[in-house]
Image (tube, rainbow, N blue to C red):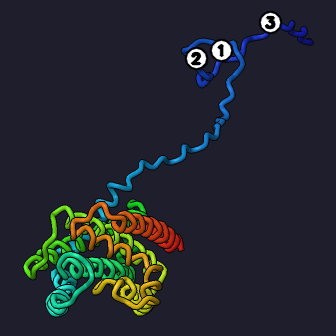
Amino acid sequence: MSRAPRRPGPARPAPSSSLSPIPVTDPAGPRTGPRPDHTMTTTAHPAPAPTRIPRLPADTAVVFGRCLRATLRSRTNLLFGMLQPLLFLTFFGPLLTRLDLGADGSPWQTFVPGILVQLALLGGSFVGLGLIVDRNLGVVDRMRATPVAPLALLLGRTLRDVVQLVAQSVLLVLLGFAFGLRAPLPGVLAGLAFVAVLSGALAALSYGLAARLRTPPEFAAVANTGVIPLMLLSGLLLPMSLAPGWLDGLSRAVPFRYTVDAVREVFRGHYAAGTVGLGAAVTLALAALCLAAATRLFTRAGRG
C-alpha cells in the first residue's frame, strides 16, 4: 500500500536566536545630510615675528652696576690709578712755579688742566686690557649668552670708566688747590665735563680694539704706539706755544691739543674764548668718531 504525497504547507519561520544584535539608535536622531569628513585639515599661519622692546638703557644700567661694584671691590686699582698723576703733581708741578709760561694766571692753572687730560688719555686708553682678561676667563661669553643687548656691554663698561676717571679728577683738583691752584668753580666743572667726554671716547675705542685683539701684549703694543706720540704732542705738561715752530705746527694735527687748551682757558675763567669753542667742537667730534668705531668693532667681534 503506497502513501499519498504530502502537500506542502506554509513555510515555518526560522527560530529566533537569543544572540541577535540589538539595534543601536543615535540619540541625536537620524542623520539626513551628507556624512561629515573627519579628515583633519590644518592651515599654516606664519609665526608672529618676535618684537623686542628697546631695553638698551636698562641693560646698560645693569652692566654699569656690575662693573662699578667690581671696581669698588678692587681698591688697589683705584689707588695705583691715581699714583702717576699725583707723582707729576708733587714732583714736577713745583718746577713750574719759577717759569714764565707766557700766559696769564698761575702756573698751576696751566699744569693741573694738563694733568687732568693726561689722566683721561692714559686712563681711558688702557681699559681694554680688562676686557681681554675677562674674555679669556669666559666672563664676556657668559654675558653675551644673557638677554642683555650686546651694545650695553660696551656702554656699561664705558660709563663705569667715565665715573671712575671723573672721581679721580675731582680728587686731583682738590690736591691741586692744596698746592696753590686757584680756579673758579664753573671753570672746574667745565674742565671736568671735558674730561668726562674725552675719557668716555677713549674708553669706548679701547674696548673696541680689545674686542678684536686677542692677547694683552698685542693690545699694549697698539695702545702705546698710539698714545705716547699723541701725549707728547698735546702739550700736556707745558703749552705747545713754548715749542719750536715746526713742533708747534705738528701738534696742531693732534686733537687732544685743542682739548688741553680749552680746559686751561676755562680754569682761568675765560669761558667765551674762541679756544674753548674750538676745543669743545673737536672733543665732541672725536667722541662721536670713537663711539661709532667702537660700536662697529665690538658688534663685529660679537658675531665672529
**The residue under label 3 is which amino acid type?**
Pro
Q: Position of residue 133 (x, y in %)?
A: 35, 84
From the image, state whether disc 3 or disc 1 is nearer to you. 1
From the image, state whether disc 2 or disc 3 is nearer to you. 2
Compare marks 2 and 3 and give the one earlier in the sequence. 3
Q: Is residue 284 left or right of residue 301?
A: left
- Taking the spot 39% from the left edge, 80% from the top edge, the residue there is 135
Q: Position of residue 188 (x, y in %)?
A: 20, 67
Circle 3 packing at 10 Å, graded few (<14), some (14-19), many (20+), is: few
Circle 2 packing at 10 Å, graded few (<14), some (14-19), many (20+), is: few
- Taking the spot 41% from the left edge, 93% from the top edge, the residue there is 217
Say which element carries label 3.
loop
**The residue under label 2 is which amino acid type?**
Asp
Name the residue tied to disc 3: 10
Is residue 144 visible to us here? no
Of residues 227 and 185, the one nearer the viewer is: 185
Q: Position of residue 77 (x, y in %)?
A: 21, 83
Spatial CA distance of label 3 from label 1 is 40 Å
Of residues 152 and 263, the one nearer the viewer is: 263
Asked if disc 2 and disc 1 are in contact, CB closer than 8 Å, the reply is: yes
Q: Is residue 63 left or right of residue 173?
A: right
**The residue under label 1 is which amino acid type?**
Arg
Name the residue tied to disc 2: 26
Spatial CA distance of label 2 from label 1 is 9 Å
User: Does residue 37 lie above or below 136 as drawn?
Assistant: above
Say which element carries label 2.
loop
User: Does residue 34 lie above or below 127 as drawn?
Assistant: above
Compare marks 2 and 1 and give the one earlier in the sequence. 2
Circle 1 packing at 10 Å, graded few (<14), some (14-19), many (20+), is: few
Name the residue tied to disc 1: 31
